[in-house]
Image: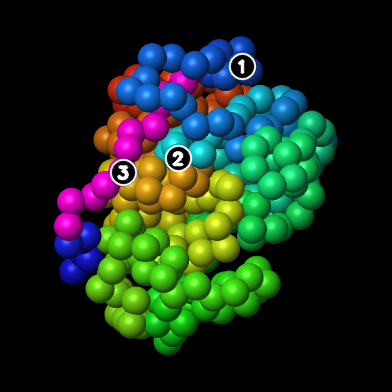
Amino acid sequence: MTHEPRTPFPYTEPGVATLRSGSLVAAAAPGPPEPAVLRATGLRKTYDPAAGPVLDGIDAAFRGGELCALTGPSGAGKSTLLACLAGHEPPSGGGVRLVDGPGPGTPVRGPCRTLVGYAPAHARPFPRRTVAAFARWTAALARVPFDPHHLARIAWLLGLGDALDTRAADLPPRDARLALCAAALLPRPRLLAVDAAPAGPGGADAAFLDRLRRAAGGLGTGVVAVAADAAAAAVADRVVALADGRLTESGAADGADDAAEAG
């Protein structure tokens, strides 16, 4: 059973923007947009030189309070881009830097849970631990104090307010993924990067991305997440499309491509 928030959700709509030719251009919005918190510039990643780059000159900025949906066919480079943003994959060229907040201009050179949270495709919360216990463990890894009040707020935003004392093994797949995201948000990162679950329901669907959008707006944290299809991408504030390791399109979510798929 899905855990829904028990009261209307009080978050504001972030501004939207369009990325054209590698530049972030502000568009009309209900209010002033949040500043960019993380920027990738000329980002390249190559595993096998003979096979060519997996990422080829990505220029993109991600804002606080915004959910950015990442779309593209399998093999487009979505998972690699998220791993590079989170510092789990070193770039072969270009780089990723913190733009706003503590330490502006700080390059992301390795995993740092207080800068960028990360929910990889195959990661799962420990099945025998409760949502709260797993989050406490994550806070210890990040070397930040465990804040139960902040966790309660995150859980409420993600629709997990009644699930903090539930073992991960007893959660439906979507809520288990959301529990992973809740733990990643606990150290107050500037951005959360969320890959799609490899199989099963709720890994990157519209309901899942809607929860992430609520958390982004409520916490002011930027979120970039793989969208399973056009319906999921339409939930986001902005959509970035990849193909063959290059940025092919970016803009408001209502322009999402029907061919968007996870992978």
Above or below residue 21? Residue 84 is below
Q: Which numbered marker is on residue 165?
A: none
Q: Image quadrant of residue 235?
A: top left
Q: Image quadrant of residue 199?
A: bottom left
- Give, as a three-letter code, the residue at label 1: Ser
Left-right relation of 32 to 108: left
Q: Are marks 2 and 3 in contact (CB under 8 Å)?
A: no
Above or below residue 246? Residue 140 is below
Q: Name the residue under label 1.
A: 23
Q: Name the residue under label 3.
A: 11
Left-right relation of 25 to 84: left
SS majority, magenta: loop
- Give, as a three-letter code, the residue at label 2: Gly
Viewer-closest of 145 and 18: 145
Q: Which of marks 1 and 3 is in front?
A: 3
- Asked if one can make out residue 45 in the rendered structure from this viewpoint, the answer is no
Q: Give the range drawn in magenta.
A: 7-18
Q: Name the residue under label 2.
A: 65
- Asked if one can make out residue 135 in the rendered structure from this viewpoint, the answer is yes
